[in-house]
Amino acid sequence: LRENLPPGTLVTTLRAIDADAGVFGQLRYAVVEQPVGEAGMGEGRDAFTVNGSSGELRARLTFDYERAKAFQLVVKATDAGNASATATVRVAVTGEDEYDPIFLSPSFSFEVPEGARRGQSIGRVLATDEDEGADGVVLYALAKPSPYFAVNRTTGTITLRMDGAAATGGGRTKREPREMTLEVVARGPLPAARSAVAQVTIDVTHTNFGLAPD
Protein backbone atom coordinates (compact mmCIF):
# COMPACT_ATOMS: atom_id res chain seq x y z
CA LEU A 1 0.00 0.00 0.00
CA ARG A 2 1.54 3.30 -1.07
CA GLU A 3 1.89 5.99 1.56
CA ASN A 4 -0.20 9.20 1.49
CA LEU A 5 -3.28 7.57 -0.05
CA PRO A 6 -6.56 8.78 1.50
CA PRO A 7 -8.54 6.90 4.17
CA GLY A 8 -10.94 4.44 2.57
CA THR A 9 -8.41 3.19 0.03
CA LEU A 10 -9.04 -0.46 -0.86
CA VAL A 11 -6.13 -2.66 0.19
CA THR A 12 -7.45 -6.08 -0.83
CA THR A 13 -10.54 -8.26 -0.73
CA LEU A 14 -10.36 -11.16 1.70
CA ARG A 15 -12.15 -14.39 0.87
CA ALA A 16 -12.70 -17.49 2.97
CA ILE A 17 -14.43 -20.67 1.78
CA ASP A 18 -17.07 -22.63 3.71
CA ALA A 19 -18.13 -26.05 2.43
CA ASP A 20 -21.60 -25.72 3.95
CA ALA A 21 -24.50 -24.85 1.68
CA GLY A 22 -27.16 -22.23 2.22
CA VAL A 23 -27.19 -19.93 5.22
CA PHE A 24 -24.49 -21.90 7.03
CA GLY A 25 -22.10 -21.24 4.17
CA GLN A 26 -22.49 -17.48 4.43
CA LEU A 27 -19.54 -15.81 6.09
CA ARG A 28 -19.02 -12.61 8.06
CA TYR A 29 -15.62 -10.95 8.36
CA ALA A 30 -14.19 -8.91 11.22
CA VAL A 31 -10.86 -7.57 12.43
CA VAL A 32 -10.18 -9.07 15.85
CA GLU A 33 -7.77 -8.57 18.72
CA GLN A 34 -4.32 -9.78 17.78
CA PRO A 35 -1.39 -11.13 19.77
CA VAL A 36 1.78 -9.11 20.12
CA GLY A 37 3.07 -8.46 16.61
CA GLU A 38 6.53 -8.94 15.25
CA ALA A 39 9.17 -6.30 15.85
CA GLY A 40 8.75 -3.42 13.42
CA MET A 41 5.09 -4.24 12.69
CA GLY A 42 2.49 -1.54 13.34
CA GLU A 43 -0.77 -2.34 15.12
CA GLY A 44 -3.22 -2.99 12.29
CA ARG A 45 -6.49 -3.28 14.20
CA ASP A 46 -7.03 0.47 14.34
CA ALA A 47 -5.48 1.15 10.95
CA PHE A 48 -7.79 -0.98 8.78
CA THR A 49 -11.45 -1.88 8.55
CA VAL A 50 -13.06 -4.86 6.84
CA ASN A 51 -16.51 -4.98 5.27
CA GLY A 52 -18.39 -7.71 7.15
CA SER A 53 -20.08 -9.19 4.10
CA SER A 54 -17.76 -8.48 1.15
CA GLY A 55 -14.40 -8.93 2.90
CA GLU A 56 -13.06 -5.68 1.46
CA LEU A 57 -10.14 -4.49 3.57
CA ARG A 58 -9.75 -0.71 3.54
CA ALA A 59 -7.38 1.76 5.16
CA ARG A 60 -8.72 3.91 7.97
CA LEU A 61 -5.70 6.20 7.95
CA THR A 62 -3.30 7.98 5.64
CA PHE A 63 -0.02 6.14 6.10
CA ASP A 64 3.45 7.63 6.39
CA TYR A 65 6.25 5.32 5.28
CA GLU A 66 8.78 7.18 7.42
CA ARG A 67 6.71 6.39 10.55
CA ALA A 68 5.57 2.81 9.88
CA LYS A 69 6.62 0.50 7.07
CA ALA A 70 4.32 -2.46 7.77
CA PHE A 71 1.20 -3.42 9.70
CA GLN A 72 -0.20 -6.69 10.95
CA LEU A 73 -3.79 -7.58 11.80
CA VAL A 74 -5.90 -10.68 12.39
CA VAL A 75 -9.12 -11.16 10.42
CA LYS A 76 -11.79 -13.63 11.48
CA ALA A 77 -14.36 -15.28 9.20
CA THR A 78 -17.45 -16.69 10.96
CA ASP A 79 -20.39 -18.64 9.50
CA ALA A 80 -23.99 -18.72 10.68
CA GLY A 81 -23.27 -21.73 12.87
CA ASN A 82 -20.59 -19.74 14.71
CA ALA A 83 -17.76 -21.83 13.26
CA SER A 84 -14.81 -19.59 12.49
CA ALA A 85 -11.28 -19.33 11.19
CA THR A 86 -8.67 -16.61 11.43
CA ALA A 87 -5.91 -15.37 9.18
CA THR A 88 -3.01 -13.01 9.82
CA VAL A 89 -2.76 -10.20 7.29
CA ARG A 90 0.43 -8.21 6.82
CA VAL A 91 0.30 -4.95 4.89
CA ALA A 92 3.54 -3.36 3.67
CA VAL A 93 3.61 0.41 3.21
CA THR A 94 5.69 1.65 0.30
CA GLY A 95 7.27 5.08 0.19
CA GLU A 96 7.08 7.84 -2.37
CA ASP A 97 9.42 10.71 -3.08
CA GLU A 98 8.08 13.45 -0.79
CA TYR A 99 11.08 15.68 -0.18
CA ASP A 100 13.43 17.62 -2.42
CA PRO A 101 17.15 17.10 -1.88
CA ILE A 102 18.68 19.99 0.06
CA PHE A 103 22.23 21.17 -0.59
CA LEU A 104 24.21 22.16 2.49
CA SER A 105 24.59 25.54 0.77
CA PRO A 106 22.81 27.04 -2.25
CA SER A 107 26.23 27.89 -3.71
CA PHE A 108 29.79 26.62 -3.43
CA SER A 109 33.14 28.21 -4.25
CA PHE A 110 36.33 26.33 -5.13
CA GLU A 111 39.72 27.08 -6.68
CA VAL A 112 41.90 25.21 -9.14
CA PRO A 113 45.37 25.45 -7.58
CA GLU A 114 48.40 26.22 -9.67
CA GLY A 115 49.87 23.07 -11.19
CA ALA A 116 46.71 20.97 -10.64
CA ARG A 117 46.57 17.75 -12.64
CA ARG A 118 43.84 15.85 -14.42
CA GLY A 119 41.71 13.83 -11.98
CA GLN A 120 42.59 16.05 -9.02
CA SER A 121 39.77 16.92 -6.63
CA ILE A 122 39.07 20.61 -6.13
CA GLY A 123 36.06 20.37 -3.81
CA ARG A 124 32.86 18.58 -2.96
CA VAL A 125 29.17 19.48 -2.97
CA LEU A 126 26.82 17.67 -0.61
CA ALA A 127 23.04 17.35 -0.41
CA THR A 128 20.73 15.38 1.88
CA ASP A 129 17.23 13.96 1.40
CA GLU A 130 14.73 13.25 4.19
CA ASP A 131 13.09 10.42 2.26
CA GLU A 132 14.00 6.85 3.16
CA GLY A 133 14.97 3.91 0.99
CA ALA A 134 15.75 4.53 -2.68
CA ASP A 135 13.93 7.88 -2.54
CA GLY A 136 16.47 9.10 0.02
CA VAL A 137 19.52 8.30 -2.12
CA VAL A 138 21.19 11.39 -3.60
CA LEU A 139 23.08 11.28 -6.90
CA TYR A 140 24.93 14.16 -8.53
CA ALA A 141 25.36 15.34 -12.11
CA LEU A 142 26.34 18.49 -13.96
CA ALA A 143 23.38 20.32 -15.44
CA LYS A 144 25.48 20.83 -18.60
CA PRO A 145 28.60 18.90 -19.61
CA SER A 146 31.91 20.67 -19.00
CA PRO A 147 35.18 20.06 -20.85
CA TYR A 148 37.09 21.03 -17.71
CA PHE A 149 35.23 19.54 -14.75
CA ALA A 150 33.39 16.37 -13.73
CA VAL A 151 31.35 15.49 -10.65
CA ASN A 152 31.36 12.09 -9.01
CA ARG A 153 27.87 10.63 -9.25
CA THR A 154 27.74 9.30 -5.70
CA THR A 155 30.09 11.49 -3.65
CA GLY A 156 29.60 14.94 -5.23
CA THR A 157 33.36 15.41 -5.55
CA ILE A 158 34.35 17.77 -8.37
CA THR A 159 37.49 16.80 -10.28
CA LEU A 160 39.50 18.13 -13.21
CA ARG A 161 39.07 16.58 -16.62
CA MET A 162 42.37 18.00 -17.84
CA ASP A 163 45.58 19.44 -16.43
CA GLY A 164 45.21 22.93 -15.04
CA ALA A 165 48.19 24.25 -16.98
CA ALA A 166 49.22 27.76 -15.96
CA ALA A 167 48.16 30.58 -18.23
CA THR A 168 51.07 31.77 -20.35
CA GLY A 169 51.78 34.66 -22.65
CA GLY A 170 49.52 37.56 -23.42
CA GLY A 171 50.70 39.67 -20.50
CA ARG A 172 48.90 40.63 -17.35
CA THR A 173 45.32 40.30 -18.66
CA LYS A 174 45.49 36.51 -18.60
CA ARG A 175 46.60 36.59 -14.97
CA GLU A 176 43.65 38.64 -13.78
CA PRO A 177 41.11 36.76 -11.65
CA ARG A 178 38.87 34.52 -13.71
CA GLU A 179 35.96 32.32 -12.68
CA MET A 180 33.81 29.62 -14.21
CA THR A 181 30.39 28.57 -12.99
CA LEU A 182 28.73 25.18 -12.98
CA GLU A 183 25.32 23.96 -11.94
CA VAL A 184 25.23 20.66 -10.07
CA VAL A 185 21.96 18.74 -9.90
CA ALA A 186 21.14 16.47 -6.96
CA ARG A 187 18.39 13.91 -7.50
CA GLY A 188 17.34 10.40 -6.58
CA PRO A 189 17.92 7.32 -8.75
CA LEU A 190 14.26 6.71 -9.64
CA PRO A 191 12.73 8.12 -12.86
CA ALA A 192 10.32 10.53 -11.14
CA ALA A 193 12.75 11.62 -8.42
CA ARG A 194 12.73 15.16 -7.10
CA SER A 195 15.80 17.31 -7.68
CA ALA A 196 17.65 20.42 -6.54
CA VAL A 197 20.33 22.60 -8.12
CA ALA A 198 23.35 24.34 -6.60
CA GLN A 199 25.65 26.84 -8.27
CA VAL A 200 29.38 26.20 -8.13
CA THR A 201 31.86 29.01 -8.77
CA ILE A 202 35.42 27.92 -9.54
CA ASP A 203 38.43 30.23 -9.56
CA VAL A 204 40.47 29.28 -12.64
CA THR A 205 42.96 32.16 -12.46
CA HIS A 206 45.94 29.77 -12.38
CA THR A 207 44.85 27.79 -15.46
CA ASN A 208 44.41 28.36 -19.16
CA PHE A 209 40.82 27.07 -19.02
CA GLY A 210 38.64 28.99 -21.43
CA LEU A 211 41.51 30.99 -22.91
CA ALA A 212 42.24 31.10 -26.61
CA PRO A 213 45.54 29.44 -27.59
CA ASP A 214 48.49 31.82 -27.80
Image (spheres, grey):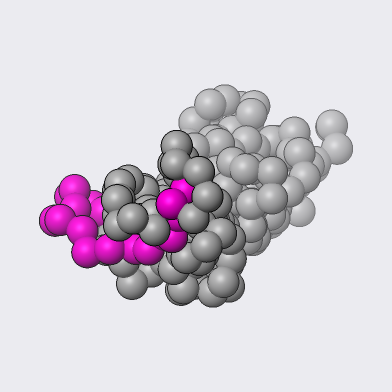
Q: Which residues are magenta?
A: 24-41
- Residue 68 shown in magenta: no
Residue at (39% x, 58% y) in the render: 80
User: Vertically, is 15 above or below 74?
Assistant: above
Residue closest to the eye, 200 or 18: 18
Side of 41 relative to 25 (left or right): left
Between 28 and 47, the one nearer to me in the picture = 28
Q: Is residue 185 above or below residue 119?
A: below
Q: Would residue 130 be found to the left or right of residue 44 on screen?
A: right
Residue 34 x/y as whole percent: 21, 58
> In this orientation, which residue lies closer to the viewer: 124 or 212?
124
Would you say residue 101 is visible in this rendering? no
Residue shown at 30% from the left, 57% from the top: 82
Task: Please tell me which residue is depicted at 50% across the width and 43% down the height of the picture.
Answer: 21
Q: Is residue 191 left or right of residue 213?
A: left
Whether residue 213 appears in this view of the structure is yes
Q: Position of residue 131 (x, y in %)?
A: 46, 58
Question: Magenta span has 32?
Answer: yes
Q: Quadrant of residue 146?
A: top right
